[in-house]
Structure formats: C-alpha cells, structure tokens
Amino acid sequence: MLEVSGLAVDYGKHAALHGVGLTVAEAETVVILGANGAGKSTLLKAVAGLVRPRPGSVIDFAGQRIAGRPGHEILEAGIALVPEGRGLFPDLTVSENLRLGAHAHRARKDEAANLAMVHDLFPRLVERRRQTVSTMSGGEQQMVAIGRALMSAPRLLMLDEPSLGLAPVLVGELFATLAEIGRRGVSLLIVEQNVRASLSIAGRGYLLEAGRMVGEGPATRLINDPAVQHAFMGASAEA
C-alpha cells in the first residue's frame, strides 16, 4: 500500500535522509528503529507532506504518487500522522480536538461511526469529553492525539514516539490499543524508542542509521538480534 524508494530529504546543507526505501502492506504494522538523530521523524514527515523530499524521491500510496504533495492532500488520500509531542490544541476540549480530526472530506460521512470507534478504543475519553486537553495527563493526551488521527478515517496511521514521556504502566496499555487498531484493518507505521514493546505488535521492522536504511527483517528476528539490542536498545537492554 505504501511504497517508498530513493527518499532523500535535506535541511539546508544537511542531508537528513539518503535514498531511503520501505514498504507497508494493507493491515500491516511496521516499526522504524534507530537512535536519536537517525532521521526517523523526518521520514514520517516526508510521507505526511510536512517536509519536501529531494526531486527523484518516490512515495506511492494506494496507487497514487504523493511525494511532494501538500499535507492536506495526503491526509485526504488516507494517511494520518500522530507527531512527536502530539500537536494537540491544548485550550480546546477533548470533544473539540476529536471533531477537528474529522475535518477531512473523506471522514465526514462516517464521523459518527469513527467517533464511536475512538470511544470504544479509549473509553476514558467519553467521561473526559468536556475536559480541556491542557489539564489532562500525558497518557490521556496521547489518547486524544491518536483518537483525533483516527477521526480522519486513515488507511495508514503513522505514530512518532507514541510512548515518549509515558509512565511504564501506560506504555503497555498504549501498545495493546495500537495492536487492536491494527486488528481493525488500519496499517501502522511506528517510530519508537521502546524497541521491545513496538516489535511485540509489529510484523516487520527497519533499522535506520544516520539517514540510511541499514537493515530490515521480521519483528520476531529483530527483537532477539544482539546487534539490534546493542545498537538500538542500549545499556538498558543489556541490563
């Protein structure tokens, strides 16, 4: 469904990505692993239309060539991004943030059904629907961010460091919910520092280092690969 090849992105004179390629199939969960500064967020932003790739980069989604198209067109094509930091409107309520997610034309006719799905996935948002987002915990805000993205009826949901800043007990709940989203037929492309948690719900993973893809494979192999543990899990994994 998503096919990326030869993706290159520059920030001024700095080359952030060099000829990167990856694929995500229908209803597949894929994880991108890499250290800080490897280019993971830039990759998601390029797919989402938030940064412009270098000419010659190829990003195809569901048969459409989307490289270089503006973000609102890519959202209409069926790709939603939950950015690092969540990107919510803090002074609006939960309900208002969710309704903004349904602004895309593709989502309007099914807004009620999409909202019911979000409430089913995140029951806490039902009781907090009138609460201002800035007064919520980090875990609750992440629920709102994912829920808002789902309100756009995406075929591909991309998440940038979804567990960042969450208490360990909430990380397990988060990835259980992401696994359920995947079971409902939404493809997931996840950038995540928590390697073990993300690979536990994924089918495949890619390794990104200094803006280049240096490896890929089934999640079951990567999660037990000593080289992956050393390079991307660090001392905490060794401990």
Image (tube, rainbow, N blue to C red):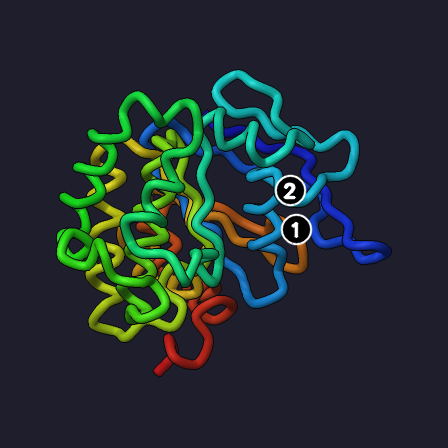
Query: What is the C-alpha distance between the residues marked 2 and 1?
Result: 6 Å
Crowding near the residue tagged with mark 1, few <14, some 14–19, many ≥20 C-alpha atoms within 10 Å: some
Place residue 92 in its image quadrant.
Answer: bottom left
Picture disc at residue 122: none
> What residue is at 71 percent from the left and 40 percent from the top?
52
Q: Position of residue 238 (x, y in %)?
A: 38, 79
Q: Position of residue 188 (x, y in %)?
A: 37, 41
Of 180 and 50, nearer the camera is: 50
Depth order, front residue of 137/135: 135
Q: Quadrant of the N terminus?
A: top left
Name the residue tied to disc 2.
20
- Callout 1: helix, strand or loop? strand
Q: Which residue is mark 1?
A: 212
Q: Residue at x 53, y 60 (%)?
A: 34
> Seen in the image, is 83 located left or right of residue 153?
right
Q: Is residue 44 left or right of residue 134?
A: right
Residue drawn where x is 35% and y is 58% of the image: 223
- Neighbor class of circle 2 (other Cα within 10 Å; few <14, some 14-19, many 20+) is many
Circle 2 SS class: strand
Residue 39, by quadrant, is bottom right
Looking at the rendered structure, the kind of residue marked 1 is: Arg
Q: Are marks 2 and 1 in contact (CB under 8 Å)?
A: yes
Q: Earlier in the sequence, mark 2 or mark 1?
A: 2
Type of amino acid under label 2: Val
Left or right: 112 in relation to 27: left
In the displayed structure, would residue 76 be above or below residue 16? above
Residue 131 place in picture, x, y as percent: 25, 61
Name the quadrant of the C terminus.
bottom left
Name the residue at the top extreme: 63
- Please report the residue visible at 25 percent of the width from the left and 33 percent of the height from the top: 114
